[in-house]
Amino acid sequence: MNQYLDAAIKVARAAGALVKEHFGRPLKVNFEEAHDIKLELDVRSQALITELLLEKFPDHAILGEEGSAENAATEFEWVIDPIDGTVNYFYSIPHFCISIALRQKGEIIVGVIYDPMRDELWHAELGGKAYLNNKPIEVSQSTDISQSVVSVGMSKTRAELEVGLSVFQDLLTRARKCRMMGSAALDLAYVATGRFDAYIERSVNWWDIAAGVLLVKCAGGRLTVAPSAIQNGKLSVVAWNGKMDRNHLTKIYP
């Protein structure tokens, strides 16, 4: 295990302990809108992650949901989501995680996702296998969309809802089951583990998916990640087991 992966695992567990400790307790809301919530605990979790990582790697940069620490001189950038699934967390739904990835010159080389409620920790490093609690994992063997379980995420903008609901309706008629779980990072971890056969979302940030992208690749899956067609600065992602025909996964999604 390299020093970066070792650090990411330790830091993810530390942040996981923090958010688990406060799960189900009264929470301070920093920002609230119709379809999203930002918690004071999001900020505290990222501050802890940032402090621990920069203590060990002071010259590295940070890109996070709750702010960034830029350093143009470094080739290393940590990509952090301190609580992916904040709305779930706020409503005491135990489906959320900490996501930490490291990019070197833009390439993801380490990925860690930790679900503290189930004590499930996924990790991968570039060129290696993907692991769940130190046991190798791989994507599912499904070859037909009719046998698949697909997770679909969507933002709540009008443009996204019009297309997103069409995608969801299309998949409902052709997949075995569709799910909307509320955590992009865990959706990708589940694809890597074979729990889901595919995951689709049209508007996400790098901190939502960076660690999961590496996990899926190392578990034998495939992904397409591209600039979002509906929100500037965001990404669209299709992740699947690589066994189903990508063109059969959805007739609508680009």
Image: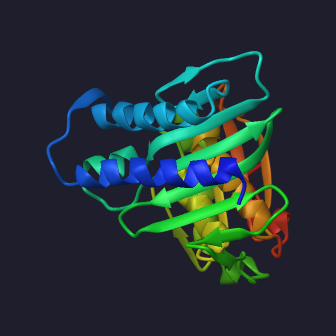
Give the residue displayed 69% in from the left and 42% down from the top. Answer: 102
- Answer yes or no: is residue 98 visible: no
Q: How is the image coloured?
A: rainbow
Residue 236 x %, y %: 70, 43
Residue 216 x %, y %: 72, 62
Instruction: Name the foreground residue: 159 vs 2.
Output: 2
The answer to whether 193 appears left or right of 83 in the picture is right
The answer to whether 129 appears left or right of 123 in the picture is right
Instruction: Name the foreground residue: 180 vs 27.
Output: 27
Instruction: Name the foreground residue: 205 vs 65.
Output: 65
Give the residue displayed 72% in from the left and 76% down from the top. Answer: 138
Quarter of the image with the N terminus in it: bottom right
- Answer yes or no: is residue 167 visible: yes
Give the residue displayed 47% in from the left and 38% down from the top. Answer: 49
Rendered position, 22 above or below 149: above
Rendered position, 55 above or below 222: above
Residue 243 x %, y %: 83, 76
Quarter of image, res 20: bottom left
Residue 241 x %, y %: 76, 71
Rendered position, 161 above or below 218: above
Figure disc tally? 0
Give the residue displayed 64% in from the left and 18% down from the top. Answer: 70
Quarter of image, res 150: bottom right
The answer to whether 16 appears left or right of 204 in the picture is left
